[in-house]
Each structure stands twice: as structure tokens, then as C-alpha cells.
């Protein structure tokens, strides 16, 4: 197969974005070629890449192709993966852009990736398929314990709450201080923390990314309670020791999702146990990529912005 081209979002430097053509390698025997329909913009890790405040991270540097939330259709494949041509799939990023770094490499019109990296989707899932990475992240955070309190009612917080219920847990309380984000709950209460006088939560999942909240959360857990850090934090985390000592507090960091998490949430979506409805609020064609990124990072009403690559 001859070498191919792709259009891609390129962060040339912090807060400097271009949409340009990049060359792709021919697929190896175990690779697939995916034509991307939609890619999501992460307001956590991608915001840090955009601003230049991402802590040292393997593969970090500019120029880079961001994005790890893409869906599309397999249009080509190497010899061992030809049977997958035609599948609709989720793509968690790619590293196929030569000297341009792929961190995480999903914001492109076409990618070449190992076949075992993509997850088959029902074609009816459509654009909502970009949410599978966040859903898998939420599932990974729930592996050991289900939350009684979730801090933050963004997309990740909503997915945590929906998955908690889907996995048989009691509806958690969700804290949100932005009135514009209090709506959209499905079977669980959303409250301003100032109106919540409970101080005996056994498990709290923090997904707001606010590094200043640890002392507040320690004061809200029961003795032996657990605080799960499921956001991504660029600032140093600290807490006052005596209150945590008195409560014998436990802290757990939920890291990157694993293949088992992706398989689990894909099954939840396929069976209807997990709904992805109502989470994508903004859409723009890739020709307006810079506007899309700025809106995603600055507009509180934007839960999830996605880029439409189909015209490219």
C-alpha cells in the first residue's frame, strides 16, 4: 500500500494551533487504517497541552497532534487485519505522524493504528462514541469502590454517577458550584456543597481537578473513608495531616483506563445499561478547530466539544 496523507490538528506551541496535512506510513500486517468521523476535545489533559502547563510526561513536546477520543470506520488494513475492514471503531489516539508527536494523536482525519488498539462499536452509537474514553476512565476509577459523593458535574462526573447506578450502587450525591452545570442529572441529586451538611461519606470521588479541595474533602469523610482522585492535576496536591490522621483517611489515585475498562463500558453502552445521551453539547467542523478548542476550554456551558472530520 502506498503512503497516505491525513489532515490533523497540530499544536505547534502552547496556544498556537494549525490544521495541516501530515504523511502517514503504510499499515503493517497488524495495523488498520481508520477514517475518523468525530474526535472529542478533552478539557483536562488537552487543556494542559494547549496552555503549556502539562507536567513532564513521556512523549511530551511540540509540535504534537492531540486527542484520544475519536471514532471512525476502518477503510484499510494490513494482511492480518483485513477482516476488520468496514467496522465502526473507537480510536484512543495514534502515533503515526513521523516527526510530529502523537500525544495522543487522535485529532486527525485518518490514522494508522494497531488493530488491537481499536474497539468495535455499533454504528448506531455515532458521535457519542467519542465518550468511550471518559466512560472507561470512570469505570477504572470505580474498580475498587463505588462513590457516595462525586465532586464535579462535568462529563466525567456524570459518567461516574451513571455508571455507579448501572453497576448496582446507590445514587451518589454530586457536588457542583456552577449553577449552569447542575441540570442533566439522571437519577441522582446534584447539590451545592454549601447546602450539604453531611460529614460521613465513606467514598468520595474527586473529578473537578481542583487541587485545593483535599482539606475540605477530608472533613467530609467518615472514619476510614476514602478519597479517590480521578481528575488530572497540574498543581501540587497537599492536605493538613491532623484531620486526615484522626479519620484514618485513605487516598487513591485512579490512573489511565485499561482494555478491560473499555470492554466493560462498550458492553454497558451496547446493552443500554449506560446512556451517553446529553453529554455532547457543542460541535464544529475541523475548519473551525481553533474556535472549537477555545470554546471547549473557556465556555462553562460546554460540557463536551467534538470536531467533525467527515467533510475533510
Image: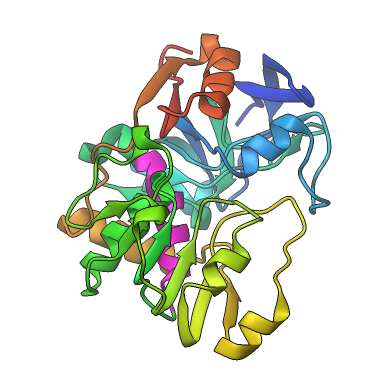
User: Which quadrant would the N terminus be assigned to in this image?
Assistant: top right
The image quadrant of residue 264 is bottom left
Residue located at (41% from left, 54% from top): 194
Work out whether residue 254 or residue 204 is closer to the camera in this orientation and state it: 204
Position of residue 202 relative to residue 177, above or below, is: below
**Can you give x and y, in whole percent of width and height, for residue 106 in the image?**
57, 36
Q: Residue at x 53, y 10 (%)?
A: 288
Which quadrant of the figure has residue 52?
top right
Q: What is the chief secondary structure element of the magenta stretch?
A: helix
Q: Is residue 142 magenta?
A: yes
Q: Which residues are magenta?
A: 129-143
Is residue 290 in view from this perspective?
A: yes
| Position in image of residue 246 (x %, y %) | 60, 89
Asked if residue 221 lies left or right of residue 211, the reply is: left
Q: Nearer the viewer, residue 16 or 225?
A: 225
Q: Is residue 31 magenta?
A: no
Amino acid at each position: 500500500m502506498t503512503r497516505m496523507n491525513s489532515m490533523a490538528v497540530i499544536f505547534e506551541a502552547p496556544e498556537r494551533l494549525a490544521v495541516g496535512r501530515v504523511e502517514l506510513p503504510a499499515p503493517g500486517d497488524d495495523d488498520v487504517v481508520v477514517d475518523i468521523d468525530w474526535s472529542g476535545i478533552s478539557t483536562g489533559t488537552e487543556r494542559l497541552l494547549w496552555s503549556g502547563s502539562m507536567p513532564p510526561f513521556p512523549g511530551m513536546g511540540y509540535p504534537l497532534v492531540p486527542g484520544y477520543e475519536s471514532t471512525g470506520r476502518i477503510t484499510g488494513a494490513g494482511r492480518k487485519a483485513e477482516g476488520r475492514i468496514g467496522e465502526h471503531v473507537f480510536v484512543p489516539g495514534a502515533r503515526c505522524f513521523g516527526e510530529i508527536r502523537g500525544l495522543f494523536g487522535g485529532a486527525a482525519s485518518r490514522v494508522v493504528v494497531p488493530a488491537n488498539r481499536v474497539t468495535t462499536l455499533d454504528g448506531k452509537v455515532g458521535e457519542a462514541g467519542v465518550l468511550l474514553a471518559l466512560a472507561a476512565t470512570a469505570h477504572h476509577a470505580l474498580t475498587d469502590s463505588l462513590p457516595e459523593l462525586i465532586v464535579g458535574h462535568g462529563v466525567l462526573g456524570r459518567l461516574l454517577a451513571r455508571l455507579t447506578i448501572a453497576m448496582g450502587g446507590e445514587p451518589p450525591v454530586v457536588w457542583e458550584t456552577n449553577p449552569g452545570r447542575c441540570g442533566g442529572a439522571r437519577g441522582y441529586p446534584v447539590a451545592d456543597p454549601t447546602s450539604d451538611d453531611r460529614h460521613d461519606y465513606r467514598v468520595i470521588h474527586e473529578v473537578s481537578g481542583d487541587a485545593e479541595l483535599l482539606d475540605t474533602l477530608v472533613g467530609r469523610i467518615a472514619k476510614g473513608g476514602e478519597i479517590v482522585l480521578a481528575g488530572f492535576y497540574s498543581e501540587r496536591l497537599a492536605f493538613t495531616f491532623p484531620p486526615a490522621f484522626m479519620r484514618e483517611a485513605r487516598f487513591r489515585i485512579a490512573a489511565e483506563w485499561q482494555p478491560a475498562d473499555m470492554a466493560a463500558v462498550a458492553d454497558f453502552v451496547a446493552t443500554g445499561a449506560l446512556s451517553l445521551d446529553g453529554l455532547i453539547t457543542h460541535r464544529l467542523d475541523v475548519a473551525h478547530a481553533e474556535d472549537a478548542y477555545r470554546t471547549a476550554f473557556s465556555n462553562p456551558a460546554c460540557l463536551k466539544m467534538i470536531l467533525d472530520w467527515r467533510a475533510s
